[in-house]
């Protein structure tokens, strides 16, 4: 009897996790990131955002791929997080105050390094 109950609970929780994973969405956003410090900053800030499951910034093409739960966040909120970190998000410019606080090597005018 105990084994049966544990089996039922296990199947229930596995099914719940699969249903949640199937509802996740993915978005790609072009940024103005330049270096590994930019990458770490953007990924850390996105990781602290509600609903964001995973983020990965490809510095070669400056595109961040974000997997998120659409029930907890929106593409606009994800872009706002990037902009408030000091970087452009697609065609939307960075928050100027946040951009000015970035290290000089991470600003838009800096050369790639």
Image (cartoon, rainbow, N blue to C red):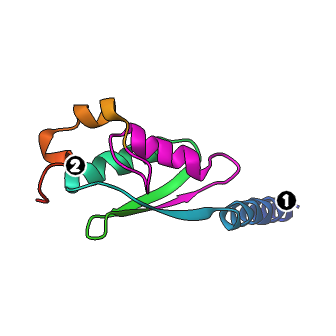
Residue occupying the point 74% across, 59% down? 13
Q: Is residue 25 left or right of residue 113?
A: right
Picture coordinates of residue 48 (x, y %)? Answer: 46, 41
Is there CB contact under 8 Å for labels 2 and 1?
no
Residue on which disc 2 sits: 108
Determine if the magenta segment contains residue 51.
no
Identify the magenta region: 65-93
Residue on which disc 1 sits: 5
Q: Is residue 98 left or right of residue 3?
A: left
Quadrant of the rendered structure where residue 97 is?
top left
Say which label, 2 or 1, has the lower sequence index.
1
Quadrant of image for the C terminus: bottom left
* Viewer-nearest of discs 2 and 1: 2
Q: Nearer the viewer, residue 16 or 87?
A: 87
Q: Is residue 57 above or below residue 61?
A: above
Q: Residue furthest right?
A: 1
Residue at mark 2 to residue at mark 1: CA–CA distance: 58 Å
Quadrant of the rendered structure where residue 3 is?
bottom right
Picture coordinates of residue 99 (x, y %)? Answer: 28, 37
SS of the residue at dot 2? Answer: loop
Q: Is residue 50 left or right of residue 81?
A: right
């Amino acid at each position: 009897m105990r084994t049966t109950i544990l089996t039922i609970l296990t199947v229930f929780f596995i099914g719940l996790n699969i249903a949640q994973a199937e509802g996740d969405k993915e978005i790609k956003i072009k940024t103005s990131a330049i270096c590994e410090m930019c990458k770490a900053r953007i990924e850390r800030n996105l990781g602290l955002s509600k609903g964001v499951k995973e983020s990965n910034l490809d510095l070669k093409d400056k595109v961040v791929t974000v997997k998120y739960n659409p029930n907890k966040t929106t593409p606009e909120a994800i872009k706002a997080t990037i902009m408030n970190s000091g970087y452009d998000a697609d065609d939307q410019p960075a928050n100027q105050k946040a951009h000015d606080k970035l290290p000089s090597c991470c600003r838009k005018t800096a050369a790639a390094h």
